[in-house]
Amino acid sequence: MEEEKDKWAFYVRGLLKAEMARRNLSFEDLANLLAEIGVHEKPHSINNKINRGTFSAIFLVQCLKAMGREVL
């Protein structure tokens, strides 16, 4: 069961990191974009959340929206 959860964490972490790479964004850049939509997170907190891969669906959608991603 834990192994399955790890696979999903790896997958969602990859989704966000790939989107950041496509847009050439750092964690600081993402923090600034999130702040523009009213979500205040420090770059190191974002880094920790994404690297863990165990963030909420809300955080995932907030990040994608902040990066301008309209379609999942």
Image (tube, grey):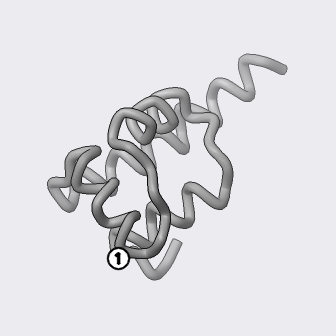
> Percent x, y for residue 37?
43, 75
How many numbered discs sit on the rendered protein? 1
> Percent x, y for residue 66?
39, 70
Give the residue drawn at x 42%, y 41%: 46
Tell which residue pokes out farthest to the bottom in this image. Answer: 70
Q: Amino acid at mark 1?
A: Gly
> Hey, which quadrant is residue 2 in on the image?
top right
- Mark 1 Cα within 10 Å, few/some/many (few <14, many 20+)? few
Give the residue drawn at x 47%, y 38%: 50
Report helix, strand or loop for mark 1: loop
> Percent x, y for residue 61?
56, 65
Give the residue drawn at x 49%, y 63%: 39
Q: Is residue 49 above or below residue 25?
A: above
> Which of the pair 10/53 is nearer the observer?
53
> Percent x, y for residue 27?
28, 44
Q: Is residue 58 left or right of residue 4?
A: left
Q: Is residue 39 left or right of residue 17?
A: right
> Which of the pair 7/19 is nearer the observer?
19
Q: Is residue 44 above or below residue 70?
A: above
Image quadrant for the N terminus?
Answer: top right
> Which of the pair 37/12 is nearer the observer?
37
Q: Is residue 62 left or right of residue 16?
A: right
Q: Which residue is mark 1?
A: 68
Give the residue drawn at x 58%, y 56%: 59
Tell which residue pokes out farthest to the top in this image. Answer: 2
Q: Is residue 67 left or right of residue 45?
A: left
Tell which residue pokes out farthest to the right in this image. Answer: 1
